[in-house]
């Protein structure tokens, strides 16, 4: 299957022959339970079946936006279950994809994986796994950010980096500095100087948010590097021209976005040069920012497959003591789930496996030479 991916004509051949299958792949059939569906997805992720994953993403979006409560609930149940059981396979697949794809398809394959992954990022489980393998995953995220073929993939890369920073805090600041993130921010803004459309403003806003997070989490050392970076100079230049632009006031949405941008930029300057630094640091909370990022209201359910009771404010759910990811309405459910499978996928077990090897085509090739 994977072999076909490297040959354009074969892909068309494959798509025509399996026309029907192509359009039904990735959807959840009515006879499937959440568990069988999720284990099917896990296998496809481990198999690097990008065609399937492409359809899966569409299906998940449809489920999420469905007018029927049952479908929407299923979306959150699948996502929660995916986060608990598949994050590990997913993170490994992201790393393998970068090392194992041919140069023609690497961005497309990354895009397919990242689209599903981005949805999974709403699950804190996925971010925890990135934290586990950060040295291997962060370079992939930067690669996504730096490629120029698929615009959406750059955005996804940037968003992933930002969310990981909010979760992993200082340990990520160091890695990002090593990858020269200020340079990426500088180029992102420089490419957009004197452009003011909505996507542009959104991109610039992400840059400022990233700088803000780096400045607060990274402390004085990071701030010093930021002050002398070109990124900050270019940003100031952009904001200066933006403030002078009167045309935008005619468009309510644009002018709103403009004032948000200017406000955030002022906060950044205050952190870097202001005297009330401490106050801002106290009010800027990574947890709040992460919740802001995952603006969708996340629905939780009891992780025990035979229960899946929806979470409500009234009764407190229990967490699995080892991974603190799976959640249960009762001790009975927790015990039942542990016996019936969670024991095998609990993050605590995977932590033992954290030094796992990424055997790839490249290393095999270099060994045989
Ligand atoms: Zn339960
Ligand atoms: Zn657990």
Image (spheres, rainbow, N blue to C red):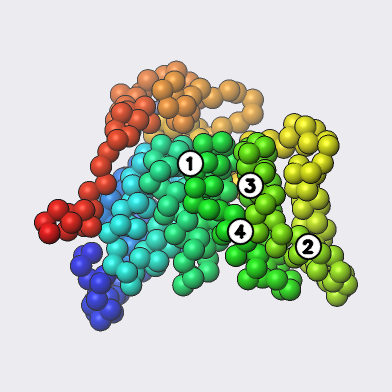
Q: Is residue 260 left or right of residue 97?
A: right
Q: Which badge, 3 or 2, is on the more N-terminal residue?
A: 3
Q: Secondary structure at mark 2?
A: helix
Q: CA distance from mark 1 to mark 4?
A: 22 Å
Q: CA distance from mark 1 to mark 2?
A: 32 Å
Circle 4 residue:
185
Circle 3 residue:
225
Q: Which badge, 1 or 4, is on the more N-terminal residue?
A: 1
Q: Nearer the viewer, mark 4 or mark 3?
A: 3
Residue at 81% x, 64% y is: 240
Quarter of the image where the N terminus is located: bottom left
| Quadrant in the rendering for residue 291 | top right
Circle 1 residue:
127
Instruction: Note whether 299 is above or below 278 in the view shown.
Output: below
Residue 69 can be seen in this image: no
Disc 1 residue lies near ligand 2 with CB under 8 A: no
Q: Which badge, 3 or 1, is on the more N-terminal residue?
A: 1
Q: Which badge, 4 or 2, is on the more N-terminal residue?
A: 4
Question: Contact, CB < 8 Å: mark 1 with mark 2?
Answer: no
Q: Nearer the viewer, mark 3 or mark 1?
A: 3
């Amino acid at each position: 299957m994977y072999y076909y991916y490297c040959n354009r004509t074969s892909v068309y051949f494959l798509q025509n022959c399996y026309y029907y299958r192509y359009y039904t792949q990735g959807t959840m059939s009515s006879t499937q339970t959440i568990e069988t569906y999720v284990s099917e997805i896990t296998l496809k992720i481990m198999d690097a079946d990008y065609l399937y994953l492409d359809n899966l993403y569409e299906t998940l979006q449809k489920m999420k936006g469905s007018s029927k409560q049952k479908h929407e609930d299923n979306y959150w149940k699948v996502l929660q279950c995916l986060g608990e059981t598949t994050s590990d396979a997913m993170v490994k697949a992201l790393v393998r994809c970068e090392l194992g794809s041919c140069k023609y398809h690497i961005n497309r394959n990354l895009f397919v994986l990242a689209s599903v992954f981005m949805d999974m990022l709403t699950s804190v489980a996925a971010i925890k796994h990135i934290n586990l393998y950060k040295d291997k995953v962060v370079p992939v995220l930067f690669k996504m950010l730096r490629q120029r073929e698929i615009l959406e993939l750059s955005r996804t890369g940037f968003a992933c980096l930002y969310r990981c920073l909010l979760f992993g805090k200082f340990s990520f600041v160091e890695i990002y500095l090593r990858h020269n993130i200020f340079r990426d921010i500088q180029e992102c803004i420089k490419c957009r100087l004197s452009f003011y459309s909505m996507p542009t403003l959104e991109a610039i806003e992400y840059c400022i948010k990233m700088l803000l997070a780096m400045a607060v989490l990274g402390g004085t050392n990071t701030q010093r590097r930021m002050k002398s970076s070109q990124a900050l100079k270019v940003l100031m230049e952009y904001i200066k021209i933006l403030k002078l632009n009167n045309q935008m006031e005619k468009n309510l949405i644009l002018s709103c976005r403009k004032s948000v941008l200017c406000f955030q930029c002022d906060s950044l300057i205050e952190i870097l040069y202001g005297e009330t630094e401490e106050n801002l640091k106290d009010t800027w909370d990574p947890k709040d920012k992460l919740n802001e990022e995952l603006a969708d209201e996340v629905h939780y359910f009891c992780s025990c497959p035979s229960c899946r009771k929806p979470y409500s404010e009234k009764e407190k759910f229990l967490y699995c003591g080892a991974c603190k990811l799976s959640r249960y309405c009762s001790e009975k459910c927790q015990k039942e789930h542990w016996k019936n499978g969670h024991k095998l996928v609990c993050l605590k077990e995977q932590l033992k496996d954290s030094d796992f090897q990424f055997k790839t085509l490249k290393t095999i090739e270099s060994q045989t030479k």
